[in-house]
Image (cartoon, rainbow, N blue to C red):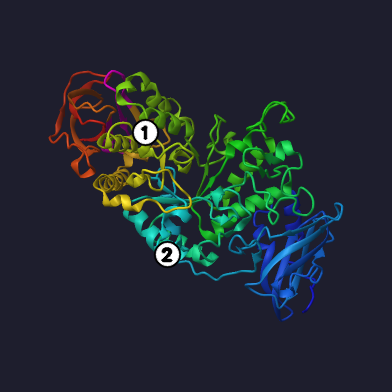
Amino acid sequence: MAQVKVYSLFTDFDINLFKAGKHYRLYQKFGSHPTTVDGIEGTYFAVWAPSAKQVSVIGDFNYWAEGEHQLNVRWDSSGIWEGFIPLVGKGTVYKYKIESHNNGIKTEKADPYARRCEHPPKTASIVWDDSYKWKDTDWMKKRKKNNALDAPYSVYEVHLGSWKRHIEEDRFLSYYELADDLVTYVKDMNFTHVELMPIMEYPYDPSWGYQLTGYFAPTARFGYPEEFKYLVDKLHQNDIGIILDWVPSHFPEDAHGLGFFDGSCLYEHPDRRKGYHQDWKSLIFNYERNEVKSFLISNAAFWMEQYHADALRVDAVASMLFLDYSREDGEWEPNIYGGRENLAAIEFLKELNQEIYASFPDTQTIAEESTAFPGVSKPVFLGGLGFGMKWMMGWMHDTLEYFAKDPIYRKYHQNDITFSLAYVFSENFMLPLSHDEVVYGKNSILGRMPGDEWQRFANLRLLYGYMFTHPGTKLLFMGGEFGQYNEWNFQESLDWNLLEFKPHKDFQNYFKALNTFYKNTPALFEKGFSGEGFEWISYDDHENCVISYIRKGNVAEENVVVVCNLTPAHREKYKIGIPVKGKLIEVFNSDSEEFGGSNVSNKKEITIKKQPWNGKEYSAEITLPPLAVTIFQFK
């Protein structure tokens, strides 16, 4: 077997950028790259291991023998080991054997930049490239409009391993199979985007993908990298955007992963107070190290560039922002100003967002951030972190807590359902009912609803009707759209058999209709992040548990009036204030018979009268169905 030849893809400029933490395309240089040198086909390898004494590529091509193919260390103090190995090609299974200067410690590591990994529980990397031909040109041309902050966002959150399984063979669906089944379903249900829980390679199924070891490789559980591209392509060809969960906050200690990579704390912070998550038993990236920042920002750019991702939902941002996150006194050290903010992580997030929006201006970044940290979705030049959107965790907690109450007690908790409107425009909020809300004994969303079966489904229709008319974008975890009754189990398929029963099928029809109405009603999204897009009619009718408001878009004539009756009482001639004269027409009613409701509705046009009410110049008398949201348009 031919030995390692001296060869490099790095220029001096690359090295300077890497050291400065400003190289955002490291995947073009690091990792394994099939290439031809002096007329000989082979593979170029490059890995960052500054504490290494020796680095060898070991694999099936050399019987995993250490020292057979030693890489060359660069002369520029970059810590990069590299070299070209002739006759090693695509499909070769390999790892790096690293001997450290640190007490001669030896580690055996997967390639941090590998484009493909072995199927878990195997842990090696695989030399890979693909020449996938994308067919989503139409989507890429128009996605700036589809991903804009004034576009409708109804996001379907999916865990690929448990959305649906192949029953006969008791296995996951492949990327190819999902490109048929999932894409067809999401399009039929009228969602605008799919959000995938992490699909980067991960070793441990119960982590749901949030403990990554292969940051540049789609998980092999469902197929090859180009097959994942095919799934993305199919989504785009059907006008569906794709959001990828991304985890720059922590990584597992698995022996083949990033931890203690070259016998030193390379990717993780060496101070355990900053470098170890006690809750998740995982390691925290060292945001103070330039090369680590380059690794992470390059990874984000990789999924945008190579896999045409439309957005990244950044996981666990709160844990990154605060040094005392989930720590007791004495377990953390203040920053140089005596505060609890992690200044390096904050700067990293700003740099990340600046790079993504500069290079991919028609995409979004979305923060899963649960604190009151200011300016998460404000531009960096205005002092913010620069995200496009932020999950509205307060809305989610308050709303689920309110809807779990028996309607007879709701009048004492009106503030729970209206409080979110006091701060909804402080950030660009996404309203999430995510996987976290249907696990660990919390019950399914349907399972939290009070009352008999009819009331539970009526409450659920009301909850989602309120959600879709509330300012902000929307996210729903899979199964919620047909009333999954059991908690989510990552090891099993969703309970699709429930659709054999009328209440669940009716509810699925309701959610499809709600998505359609939302997408076709500009007043519900054109000004979703602006106070100009919302006007209260009444938030203080505690006794009747009714809230009413107007949602506004760019065209005043297309504004809609929303009335939520939060109890089972059927109310006739309920009076609401209206700011303009004319007539009202009922255009959506969650109590419709086709959705499983009691079919109480406003069948005729309603005349708006010159009688002041609710602080408005005019008023109208309407019929309120039980436990329902009713939406009117002006005529």
Q: Please identify the quarter of the rendering in which residue 628 is found.
A: top left
Q: Is residue 622 above or below residue 362?
A: above
**Residue type at mark 2?**
Glu
590 displayed left or right of 149? left
Q: Is residue 250 above or below residue 562?
A: below
322 displayed left or right of 305? right
User: What is the x, y in percent for residue 83?
Assistant: 77, 69
Instruction: Say which of 339 and 414 sits in front.
Output: 414
User: What is the x, y in percent for residue 573?
Assistant: 16, 24
| Residue 367 falls within the magenta-colored stretch | no
* Local secondary structure at mark 2: helix
Q: Residues within 10 Å of mark 1 (few under 14, many from 20)?
A: many
Location of the C terminus (image quadrant): top left
Q: Is residue 194 above or below residue 36?
A: above
- Callout 1–callout 2 Cβ contact below 8 Å: no
Residue designated by label 1: 533
Location of the N terminus (image quadrant): bottom right
User: What is the x, y in percent for residue 70?
Assistant: 81, 68
| Count of numbered tags | 2
Of the numbered discs in the image, which one, if any, rests on residue 481? none
**Residue type at mark 1?**
Gly
- Which is closer to the viewer, label 1 or label 2? 2
What residue sits 32% from the left and 55% below the top?
188
3D distance between C-alphas at marks 1 and 2: 41 Å
User: What is the x, y in percent for residue 291?
Assistant: 72, 50
What residue sits 67% from the left and 33% below the top?
323
435 displayed left or right of 80? left
Magenta range is 536-563
